[in-house]
Image (spheres, rainbow, N blue to C red):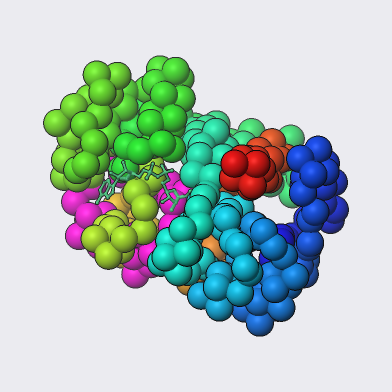
């Protein structure tokens, strides 16, 4: 059972399951309700549930006579009652790394865009013709880049900035940065020594508001703040204060606290570049996500 999906067709899923002799039952195109999932799953046995966002409740997990797996088309497992699945002895799987390339590319693209003024100059050329204004253009390789959260995506972002000739610092209290980035960095050294600060920490109670007014006030080199992780890691009120007081050069935000209706004051600010929580996406990442989630189902149903 595919509980819900946003795709125009299910050719990819159908071909993977047909080859394995698995019948696909598909739910609504957009997130189904818990009741719909429960109704559809009752038809399936042995059952495998593939889900994007629809709630996979304890009832849905307990209904099929033989449930083998709940596979999430994504990273987080918040829509799945993992405890109920575990009690039934069913596998719960996710695809934690399908968009490492895309999110790290997005961070690099934001910074390159700012250093070379691509979006600003494109807007100006279209609005008022072939007039050049080179103010604020920077040499990327001279930027000192600080990475907050040296996990799957943080490491790949670090590798890409290193390849562009930048000095890279990383801060992660749980993983020691390897020798390719400067070691011994703290949150305070990232604030004081970096021209670009890229946020790759997960949203946790301890990281909510990690980038607040105090952090932004303590920055030493008017950094560019890049958030491609989760909005609430950056305090909106702190960000507005930093933009208004000139503590930072600007902000590049794929995620903003309050999305999908983020503060117009932030979106409209001339020093903010924003994209609508899209860093994960590409044709390749979506195809990889769908293929790998289906393969987990095939692996489990075929023993
Ligand atoms: P990951 O778990 O591999 O890495 C996160 C790292 O952050 C870990 O190494 C962890 O030790 C570290 N960390 C935890 N608390 C910290 C703290 N207080 N200070 C510094 N580091 C800390 O996760 P990942 O795959 O690299 O993804 C990172 C985040 O990116 C995800 O949690 C998600 O919120 C976000 N994300 C965004 C998009 C998007 O489209 N914008 C897509 C995928 C992931």
Residue closest to the far bottom:
35
| 55 up-or-down from 25: above or below | below
Q: Residue at x 31, y 27 (%)?
A: 168
Q: Residue at x 43, y 46 (%)?
A: 226
Q: Residue at x 18, y 35 (%)?
A: 185
Q: Is residue 142 left or right of residue 291?
A: left
Is residue 58 visible to us here? yes
Give the percent coordinates (x, y) of residue 106: 55, 40
Give the percent coordinates (x, y) of residue 255: 49, 57
| 35 up-or-down from 300: above or below | below
| 103 up-or-down from 235: above or below | above
Give the percent coordinates (x, y) of residue 109: 55, 36
In front of the other: 303 or 81 = 303
Residue closest to the far front:
65
Q: Quadrant of the N terminus?
A: bottom right
Examine the structure image and report whether residue 234 is included in the region drawn in magenta.
yes
Q: Which residues are magenta?
A: 213-237
Q: Which of the 4 image quarters holds residue 132?
A: top right
Q: Which of the 4 image quarters holds residue 41?
A: bottom right
Q: Quadrant of the C terminus?
A: top right
Give the percent coordinates (x, y) of residue 124: 68, 45
Q: Residue at x 38, y 31 (%)?
A: 155
């Amino acid at each position: 059972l595919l509980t819900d999906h946003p795709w125009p067709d299910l050719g990819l899923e159908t071909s993977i399951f047909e080859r394995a002799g698995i019948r696909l039952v598909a739910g609504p195109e957009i997130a189904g309700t818990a009741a719909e999932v429960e109704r559809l799953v009752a038809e399936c046995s042995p059952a495998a549930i593939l889900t994007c966002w629809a709630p996979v409740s304890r009832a849905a997990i307990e209904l099929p006579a033989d449930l083998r797996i709940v596979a999430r088309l994504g990273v987080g497992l918040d829509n799945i009652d993992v405890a109920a699945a575990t009690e039934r002895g069913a596998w719960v799987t996710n695809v934690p790394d399908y968009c490492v390339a895309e999110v790290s590319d997005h961070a690099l693209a934001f910074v390159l865009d700012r250093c070379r003024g691509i979006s600003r100059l494109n807007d100006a050329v279209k609005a008022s013709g072939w007039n050049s204004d080179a103010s604020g253009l920077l040499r990327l390789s001279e930027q000192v880049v600080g990475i907050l959260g040296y996990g799957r995506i943080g490491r790949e972002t670090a590798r890409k900035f290193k390849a562009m000739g930048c000095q890279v610092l990383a801060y992660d209290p749980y993983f020691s940065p390897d020798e390719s980035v400067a070691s011994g960095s703290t949150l305070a050294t990232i604030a004081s020594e970096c021209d670009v600060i890229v946020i790759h920490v997960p949203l946790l109670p301890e990281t909510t508001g990690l980038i607040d007014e105090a952090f932004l006030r303590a920055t030493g080199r008017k950094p560019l703040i890049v958030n491609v992780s989760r909005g609430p890691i950056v305090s909106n009120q702190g960000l507005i204060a930093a933009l208004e007081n000139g503590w930072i050069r600007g902000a590049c935000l794929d995620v903003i606290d309050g999305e999908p209706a983020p503060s117009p004051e932030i979106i409209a600010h001339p020093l903010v570049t924003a994209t609508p929580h899209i860093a994960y996406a590409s044709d390749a990442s979506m195809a990889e996500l769908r293929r790998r989630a289906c393969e987990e189902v095939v692996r489990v149903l075929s023993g």
